[in-house]
Image: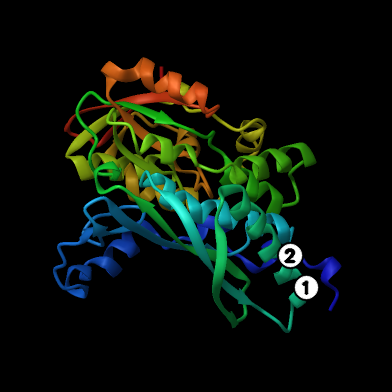
Amino acid sequence: MENEAIKLTQFSEGSGCGCKIAPAILEEILSGSQTWQRPDANLLVGNHQKDDAAVYQLSPDLAMINTVDFFTPIVDDPYDFGRIAAANALSDVYAMGGVPIFANAVLSWPVEKLAPALAAKVLEGAKSICQQAGVTIAGGHSIAAKDPIFGLSVCGTIHPQNIKSNSTAQEGDLIYLTKKIGIGVLATALKRGKINPEDYQEMVNTACQLNSIGQHLGQQDFVHAMTDVTGFGLLGHLIETCEGAGLSADLHFKDIPLIKGVQSYIDQFIFPDNTYRNWNAYSPKTSGVNGMELVHLCDPQTSGGLLVAIDPAQQAAFETLMQIEQSPAYLIGNYKAAGEKVVDVLIA
């Protein structure tokens, strides 16, 4: 096997979370999901809402969070692939306000094309991120298939009163984002052989940054709602939070933070094809976008940041907490009463 010449991204049409099923198709697939489950009063969060993970109550003071997330390679280096996939899967537990406790690995590997040693490096990278999070990879499942795929199923814990849903924002809440946007653009630049080493490292550093601030935000009453930004882009996940709460939002375009170097690739028309897929799904619900702004809004993120709804009366308390925990927090908009469009993008 000439593995030195093999690039992992050549096995993926849509890198990372960009390989998610399109929003409209996913809606069709899940349209009958209410019939999948028997009513269970202990299932606090299930498939009846578009949340980040399932939550099951075990006792008055304890609930279990469970999620699974996996995707095709977003980078060529197997160790980095494992790190990014692990950080992305852990994020779903953090987005609910919980603490991850253990994980199981999900691995598909084309053993006739890629050496098992490369898969071992993927697992090694995942283990390094899990150790950083205080999480053990307890086991997992693997298959031999034509495409490399990796991810984790993660279990976590939370007090039932601390659960942060993506559907509980309140009118007037401030909207904060905890990571810069542009991972999809940079991943596309990598696949096209256009990325420079500094921008590659910036992408990996951003994607591997744990959203562990979520477990602290879960304990705060002034945090009304939370989700993470992944394959549907900033706009898609913001729309989910709005529709879940029956609200609209103002989104200040100039305040959306971009990873260093991303704009230069956008200017070269380097961005994922799935950016258009996201825009086609969400543009009827959006006003104020006239051109290439759609790339910032719809770039599919892999292991993106948290989108957080904050009580405006507690803005100072929130920003102080973020400073103490050394977590970025970018104010990008606010929720408002439901209007003609779900999201109004304010360009000026």
Query: Which residue is tagged 1?
Result: 117
Q: Residue at horizontal 46%, vertical 53%?
A: 100
Q: Secondary structure at mark 2?
A: helix
Relative side of 11 to 26, left or right = right
Q: Amino acid at mark 2?
A: Lys
Q: Amino acid at mark 1?
A: Ala
Q: Residues within 10 Å of mark 2 (few under 14, many from 20)?
A: some
Q: Residues within 10 Å of mark 1 (few under 14, many from 20)?
A: few
Are dots 1 and 2 in contact, CB under 8 Å? yes
Determine the CA span between mark 1 and mark 2.
Answer: 6 Å
Q: Which mark is residue 158?
A: none
User: How many numbered badges does the structure rendering display?
Assistant: 2
Query: Which residue is tagged 2?
Result: 121
The spot of residue 272 in percent (x, y) is: 56, 50
Q: Secondary structure at mark 1?
A: helix
The spot of residue 55 in percent (x, y) is: 30, 57
Residue closer to the observer: 194 or 187: 187
The spot of residue 77 in percent (x, y) is: 74, 58
Q: Residue 146's quadrant in the figure?
A: bottom right
Q: Quadrant of the N terminus?
A: bottom right
